Every structure is written in C-alpha cells, then in structure tokens.
Amino acid sequence: MYTPSYWEVSAFWQKKWDFIVIGSGIVGLITAQELKHKYPDADILVLERGILQMGASTRNAGVACFGSISELLLQESTESQLDMLNLVNLRFSGLQRLFEITQGKDIGHQSTGGYEVFTADEEDNYQHYLTQLDRINALLEPITHLKQTYIPKDEDISKMGLKNVSHLIYNPAEALLHSGKLLFALWQNTQKIGILVWNQMEVEHVNSYAEGAEIILKQGRLYADKVIITTNAFAKKLLPELDVVPGRGQVCITKPIPNLRLKGAFHYQEGYYYFRSVEDNRVLLGGGRNLDFKSEETYEFGFTELVKNKLTTMLKEMILPDTNFEIEYWWSGIMGFGQEKAPIIREVKPNIYCAVRMSGMGVAIGSKVAQKVAEMM
Ligand SMILES: Cc1cc2nc3c(=O)[nH]c(=O)nc-3n(C[C@H](O)[C@H](O)[C@H](O)COP(=O)(O)OP(=O)(O)OC[C@H]3O[C@@H](n4cnc5c(N)ncnc54)[C@H](O)[C@@H]3O)c2cc1C
C-alpha cells in the first residue's frame, strides 16, 4: 500500500501544479510540450494510467496519411467541400508539425507513398472516382503542393504481389512511421524540457473550482491551475457530457517475409481496412470495425474471431497470395469517434479543458490539436 512521506506530500501532492495533462498519448505529450514552450517556468505534470500508453498512439498502424480519394469524396458529399478541405489541411499541416517536433529523432519515417485499393466489385465507384480525380487534385494542390496528389497506378498491382485487386490509386505524399519510436521520441522531448510524466496513475474524477481544478486518483488528490484532458476514446469516463464513443481497431503483423514485394501504405474500403509494409519485411494489417460496429464500440482491448478470420483471409487471398507467412502478433487499440469528425477542443468547465475525439486520425492531427488547446491557456 502506498503511503506518502512528508517530503512527497509537500513537494508533489500538496503543491499546486500550473498544468496537469491527463493522458500521455500523442496529444497529451505534445500539449505538455507546447505549454512548456509558452510558459517556460511552469510546473507541468502528465498523468498516464498505463505502464506505457494504453489507448491508440502506440497501438495504431503508423501511417502518416491525410485521406484517400474515396474518403474525401464521401466527406465532401455528406458534409461540405470546405469541411473536407479544412480537414485535409489540418491533417497535412499536422503531419508537417509532427515531423518538425521530432526532427533529428529516429521515428522510422519512410517516404513510400500510399495506395487506395479497389476490387472488382467496386468498379463503378472506381470509375466515378476517376472522373473526379483532376478536380480533387486541383483543390488539393495549394495544400500538398503537388500537381497530382492522386494518380491511377494499376501497374503496381503485380509489382506489389497483390491478387484480387483491380485498381490502385497512388498518393506520393503518404509515409510510414514506427509508432513505438515516435512515442519514445515525444516522451524523450517531454522529459528533456523538464516535464514530469507519472505512469500508472489513473484519474478517477476531475472537479472544477474557482481557482483551479482537483484531480482524484486512487493514490490521492492533486491540484492544478488548469487541467487538460487528452484521454481521447476514454474521455466520456471523466466528462460524461461529451459526444465521444470508443471504436476498437484490431491489428496483426506477420513474421519477416523473405523477398517481400509489398511496399508502402494501403487503404481499402474507405479506410476500414489498412495494411502496410514494415521496415524488417513484415506486413501489418488492421481494420474490420465495419463488420460489427456494435461489438467494436468498446473500451476493452481484445479480439473477435469475426475480424481475425477476415484479416487472415485478406492476407491469404489479397495481400500475400502464394506466400508462406506466419502472423506473429495480434493487438488492438481504442480510437475515439462521435457524430462529427472534428475533434473537441474546448474549456468544458472552469479550468478544465479537453482535446479529444481524434476520429482515427490522431497521428495526423494530434500535433495541431495539441497546439490549439495550448493556445487557449
Ligand atoms: C488500429 C489503429 C490504427 C490507426 N491508424 C491511424 C493512422 O493510420 N493514421 C492516423 O492518423 N491515426 C491512426 N489511428 C488513430 C491514432 O492512433 C489516434 O487518433 C491517436 O493515437 C490518438 O492520440 P491521443 O493522444 O488523442 O489518444 P491516446 O493515444 O488514446 O492516448 C490517451 C491516453 O490517455 C490514457 N488515459 C485514459 N484514461 C485515463 C485516465 N483516466 N487517467 C490517466 N490516463 C488515462 C490512456 O492510457 C492513453 O495512453 C489509428 C488507431 C488505431 C487504434
């Protein structure tokens, strides 16, 4: 049982922190860094419930992407052209910012480009996307500075060793990252500038009062002038009024495959499936939430036979046909979704702020979301 010493009580527990950030994912760590740059003398504490991050940041696919053509056209039709362009801009500039922040660190960055995959049953959709290609490329040019962000590239189907695939649309601006190395780099940056990160500290409640906020944990109470909640999918547990629901993503990775032909990032069925090559000749594949949305709307890390079978079949029949492979790891991560795609960045109660609901795009938008919430302090 933990019983604090007098020294600990006076230096850590009774002290009023300038800022306490809850959650040490991409958004939490970058928010803490932004605040430290803005207020160099501030005492900043980050509280994380896991030994490592226990959400999405270290459990995703590690793809630096800003939307496939099908995803963009869907958003343009269901929301508006402006919403779609604003989101592309946020994702693209967010990635540039992330690379700036981690400059000089090994985050496993590979400029491979990425593809959207179309199968024979999607021929009509594909033909429609082709008619829209020039228009979308012109709209995106001021953001990506590319004449052609999306390029039909069917010749790469056999080069990549794919089967049962009819078409590919290539995006040269997509890249691959190593999510573990990325978070390690962000954590190192955080420590270097004097921010304290406490792990295995699960926050149970946050209370607002006129001069600050109180944080309740199993181990005791902490006080801060301002608290920033960056727990993404788990935000509703602390702030029940928010429109954030969890969405689980199940992922597998193969053992290294000699002479692997696949290279780059791949998106299939409006992004519900994603696969990629990994530095040491492995293939990572994830997705399938759309097979049973209700079961995947969960806070529990875990797997279902339904999704595992689908992913295994995709590996055998589409991604690695005629190749002997073994799956080495399965894992899952929890994302935060809601009625709208845009993140929630606001003061929820006096002195309590949130920067949550990354809608499965936090690698891309996380740095900008962190910047925006820090600007509010
Ligand atoms: C399988 C998968 C694939 C993905 N692929 C991509 C992709 O290709 N491109 C992309 O841009 N994004 C992708 N994402 C989404 C991206 O990973 C997330 O949007 C991003 O990591 C969210 O970062 P975050 O910091 O907001 O949240 P998280 O990384 O979830 O961090 C929240 C942290 O809060 C902690 N926490 C929760 N509750 C408490 C509490 N009460 N007390 C203390 N700590 C708490 C958690 O343990 C966690 O570490 C993917 C996600 C998954 C799961």
Image (cartoon, rainbow, N blue to C red):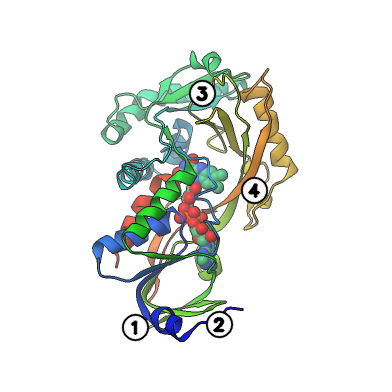
For marks 2 and 1, give the CA distance.
28 Å
Mark 3–mark 1 distance (CA, rounded to whole Å): 57 Å
200 over 124 or under it: above or below? below
- Between discs 2 and 1, the one toward the N terminus: 2
Task: Identify the residue at the far bottom of this view.
Answer: 6
Q: Residue at x 29, y 30 (%)?
A: 141
Q: Which residue is mark 3?
A: 126
Are discs 3 and 1 less than 8 Å apart at CB?
no
Q: Quadrant of residue 148?
A: top left
Whether residue 259 sits left or right of residue 20 in the image: it is right
Q: What residue is disc 1 on?
A: 211
Q: Please give the name of the residue rendered at 73% of the width and 36% of the height, measured from the top-left corner.
A: 309
Whether label 4 touches label 1, CB < 8 Å: no
Count residues near mark 2 (Cα–Cα under 10 Å), then give few for <14, some for 14-19, many for 20+.
Answer: few
**Residue 354 location in percent, x, y?**
42, 65
Q: Secondary structure at mark 4?
A: helix
Circle number at residue 293: 4
Residue 158 spot, x, y in % from top left:
55, 14
Name the image quarter holding the N terminus.
Answer: bottom right
Residue 358 in view, yes or no: no
Q: Amino acid at mark 2?
A: Thr
Q: Say which residue label 2 marks.
A: 3
Mark 2 and mark 1 residues within 8 Å of each other at the beta carbon: no
